[in-house]
Amino acid sequence: MERMHSRWLMLLAPAAMALMTVGQYFIWIYAPEEATMGLVQKIFYFHLPLAWWAFAAFFGVFVSSILVLVTKREDWDVWAAALAEAGVLLSGLALVSGSVWGRAAWNTWWTWDPRLSTTLVMWFVYAGYLVLRAADVGGAKAARVRAVLGIVAFLDVPLVFVSARLWRSIHPSVFASKSGGLEPEMWTTVWINVLAWGVLCTALVLTRYHGMTLRHRVEAALVRMQEKTLQ
Amino acid sequence: MMGARPLLRLDAVSHFFGSRLIFKGVTCALEPGSIMLVAGPNGAGKSTLLKIMAGLLTPQAGRVERTVPDRAMAFMGHQTFIYPSLSALANLEFWDALYGRRLDQAGIMALLDRVGLKAFALEAAGTFSRGMAQRLSLARALLVDPLLLFLDEPATGLDKASLTLLHGELEKARIRGAGIVWISHDLERDLPRADTLLRLGGRAMTYFGPASGLDVEGS
Amino acid sequence: MIGHAMAVAHKDLRLAFAHGQGPVQAILLGLLLVFMFSLSAQPGERFTPQQGVAIFWLCSAFGVVLIFSLLFRFEEENDTATALLLSPLPIQGLWLGKTMAGFVLLALCQVFFFPAALVFLGLDPGGSLGSMLVMVVSVDLGLCILGGLVGAMGHGQGAKDALLTIIVFPLQIPLLLGGIRIGVGLMQGEDLAGLGDWFGLVLAFDAVFAGAALFLFPHVFRGE
């Protein structure tokens, strides 16, 4: 298992680097400059993959949390941790890039928009989730308590989104609108960058999973050593 | 009495906390109307074993079979299971409600009388001395007319009168056909009352069998 | 299970009022918050209904955290939690009982928050009292359903209340938005039917988390 993970990592990390480089080429050279927004529009090629993969990572936390409860295997808990970390990082970057976009497009750093607000609330929820993890809430049954939290957090997402949408909406809906659609070259750039971030994100999660399992093993080995010396 | 279906049976039960083995290979059975004494040095896992028997913990390996439903099972642990801000009466009323409201207020008062707490029925349980709290805890256990009774060092901090009361009530329960599992530190005092002895030590069960004829020191 | 839950709720309310205290801590904090928010306007200036209703729900959100940490603290002394696990009480009954007790205590707090918001924030109460009650009850239900589930996570953890707020508050957001929007709408003379979307959202929240709690609570509150 361990070996398999590190083999995947050996493959994924260089692939992520290569894809990110190609992605940059597509963003800055291949894709045409957007007529009304100019250079600022290029933020979109970062923002969208970040937001998507953040959401995917949170969904991953949800699935791993269910698996913790169903299979009672603790390694799913480690997956949930790794995915939550990645999700918080990516959604944080998505928020910053979205904010810069908002400044350029709507002349404000922050505005109430359902997707932006949903992302912010999710960032809060999962950042809180990580803090609770670090604080070891739940004692001996910690893994299951955290799993419950991981499930509840995701159940909240659609409710947050609907409520934020009812509250107010101005986000450009790229897919729904016909006039504001993207050029085919722009779409190619979007997909390449989505792929690049996906591979990078997977590599990140694997690295963290690997690191955390190693730490658990070292800690367990240390306890055994101490027990031996005490006997 | 032997030959009846055992109230409780453990088959090759092992338990770990994390990767640390607590004990392995515990196999035993508890017949109706008998007392099983559990003994062993500190940290041998006696309380853990009791929790496994009561269904509070699930062992990592082995099987636990109980033929007694939850509502006929009572547990007296280190902790008294008492709400200190409620009166003795209110405490018992609550547990009675959870166990299906078998007693009315008069019945509960009679029970408090049985453990010598009738005069303190309306006082907050938090003001009770250790001995009184243990008596209330005993009343809580007797509330359900238990068929299966788990005791984790119930004699700790009890005075002579309370101890006599405890032993008397256990004897009554045994005669009624209840099975009792009893963790004790004082083998000299308690072994003569027991039918079987289960001894833990060195992360395993070292003895399970009849209690009679055992030498307290050497066993 | 309902009978068991009622027994738990009855016992918890008895405990909460045993020293004549009740949810005094939550009430006091709420009143303090209302007063402190009143500092954000010039003396004599009136708050908009939106500000007033938002502050009211903020006080309730803090109140819920304090109430449920109190309710689960009851099971820590003398390890009554273990006794509950050993009893025939279905463990979801414990969640339901705590949720019911929390609901009563929260409603009691709001009896104090409401006039305080009127006085300190200079609000005009308007709209139908009946609709207002329906709204408050359905939002309170959601707050308590979630509080009963998340509150148990802090159980046996000592002073983890502050930590739990950072997860409870963001989860409450849809409810709070709903409570604010419906409250403002009602104060401005709309009727519940016109606020159907929001009302549906609040009820959906109640239903989703009640369902989740029934499944998940046993994993949170266990002896192991």
Image (cartoon, coloured by chain):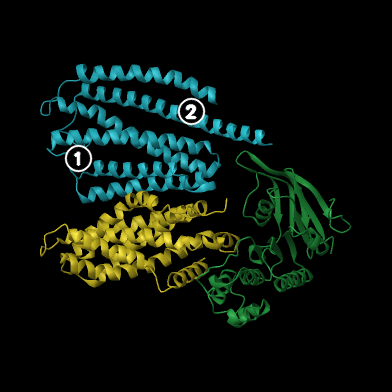
Residue at 47% from the left image edge and 61% from the top image edge: C73
x, y percent for residue B79? 60, 61
**Which residue bears the numbered disc 1?**
A171
**Which residue bears the numbered disc 2?**
A210
Q: Residues within 10 Å of mark 1 (few under 14, many from 20)?
A: some
- Residue A144 seen in the current view: yes
Along the viewing direction, whichever of C223 and B192 lies nearer the viewer: B192
Residue at 33% from the left image edge and 63% from the top image edge: C140
Q: Which subunit holds the residue at mark 2?
A: A
Q: Is residue B55 left or right of residue A163?
A: right
Could you say whether the residue bearing mark 1 is in a helix, strand or loop? loop
Relative to B210, residue A37 above or below: above
- Residue C211 seen in the current view: no
| Residue type, mark 2 in image | His
- Residue C181: quarter of image: bottom left
Quick one: which chain is green? B
Of mark 2 and mark 1, the one earlier in the sequence is 1
Relative to A12, residue C53 above or below: below
Quick one: which chain is cyan? A
Q: Which subunit holds the residue at mark 1?
A: A
Residue at 79% from the left image edge and 71% from the top image edge: B175
| Residue type, mark 1 in image | His
Residue sitting at the far right? B213
